[in-house]
Amino acid sequence: MMMSHISMPQIAEDKTISSRHEFLPYGRQWIDEEDIDAVISVLRSDWITQGPLVQRFEQAVAEQCGALYGVAMANGTAALHAACVAAGIGDGDQVITTPLSFVASANCVLYCGGQPIFADVCTDALTIDVTEIEKRLTPKTKAIIAVDFSGHPCELDEIRAFAQKHNLIVIEDAAHSLGAFYKGKPVGGLSDMTVLSFHPVKHITTGEGGMVLTNNPEFAERLERFRTHGITRQRESFQEVDQGPWYYEMLDLGHNSRITDFQCALGLSQLNKLNMFVESRRELARCYQESLEELQEIQLPIELPTVRSSYHLFPIRLQLQQLKKTRREIFQELQDCGLGVNVHYIPIPWHPFYQKLGYQKKQWPVAEAAYEELISLPIWPAMSKNDVDRVIQSVKKVVGHSKK
Ligand SMILES: *Cc1c(COP(=O)(O)O)cnc(C)c1O
């Protein structure tokens, strides 16, 4: 879709923009002419990867999010992996995370030889519950990966206080929450490391892409090394004698997790629109709240007074005891209305791979009950008024027909 102005109304009135897409996905990118021009100009330049824009993008994101350092990566998953490595996670270390997330939030621990330990979520925001973290704490616990589910930041102060008391590192998986605020502060500088994803369904996109934000220079250095084979060209870091201008050293086993310059050009151009993107999502969420509040058979996502969510998702919960249809049937009917509904998430330890590792179901009653009831409605900044109305009318119709 093409839109040449960033100062559009918060919900586009222009129905030609997106309503001609019969099917409304749950999320999608906004790419305009400025974005396209930014990428093209890099393609015409000397550098298509490892040029000046990577650092500019890192600095711009870090500044906007209130962090000192940003280290851009090939994708959010690589960023999570890098963060675990920088945190020193290794064989046998335990890392506590939420079962209600995308698998990448836990897989990164396994990549390092560590053991993900799942702690149940709070009933309100469905983010990890500190009292549940405490129950899972052992002498092997090294870190917490807290996921800002749907764009709603976790109880970061409580998590940080708990982590400090027990000498744990907090990695915040903020793939959903770029542009969100916690107690008046932007997400990004509030945890030891904060991980972003720039996948097209996320707040800003670089195609594939991710970043780790941190205020800790040592973490930043380890993250940079991880991104490029564990290699350093910094003399101060050399362990042997500098053998000449060509000289570099590989200090640890890193990966190639680099992002390209043309992706960073897109990222910088997208970042200019972040505030507008988040405002649009919040406005869409407000429309949903206002129009769907009356339905007793669904529970809408909450926003705690301490936070400002950036609404990556708008997950509703079916009150199944008041409905005569199953979640599956209702999901199907919404899909039949052309809505790209989705379910976020199948609990991570329920996946066959995790089951084979020995994880048992029924250990996380809040997250597992939520999973049975959740349906994510479409929410993305270029949705038109007409699109939102269509979603609202479809939900009202389908839920209305399904009442007991
Ligand atoms: C998208 C996402 C990731 C992974 O990001 P990619 O850029 O797709 O690798 C990790 N965690 C969560 C919660 C996500 O939503």
Image (spheres, rainbow, N blue to C red):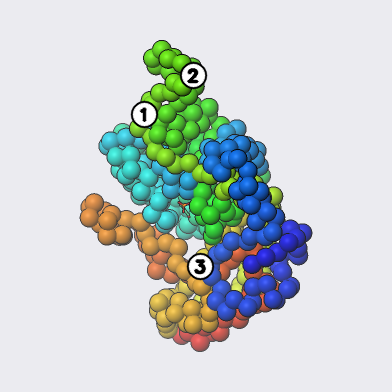
User: Disc 1 residue type?
Assistant: Asp
Marked residue nearer the N-terminal end (3 or 2): 2
Which of the labelled discs sits on residue 252, or is there none? Answer: 1
Q: At 50% from the left edge and 72% from the top edge, which residue is drawn?
A: 341
> Which residue in the structure is indicated by mark 3?
376
Mark 3 or mark 1: which comes first in sequence? 1
Q: Is residue 290 visible?
A: no
Amino acid under label 3? Ser
> Which residue in the protein does label 2 denote?
245
Q: Closer to the camera, 42 or 220?
A: 42
Check disc 3 and report its element: helix, strand or loop.
strand
Q: Is residue 316 above or below residue 367?
A: below
Judged left or right of residue 350, residue 210 is right
Looking at the rendered structure, the secondary structure element under dot 1 is loop
Give the residue at x 68% y 72%. 17
- Residue 339 at least partly seen: yes
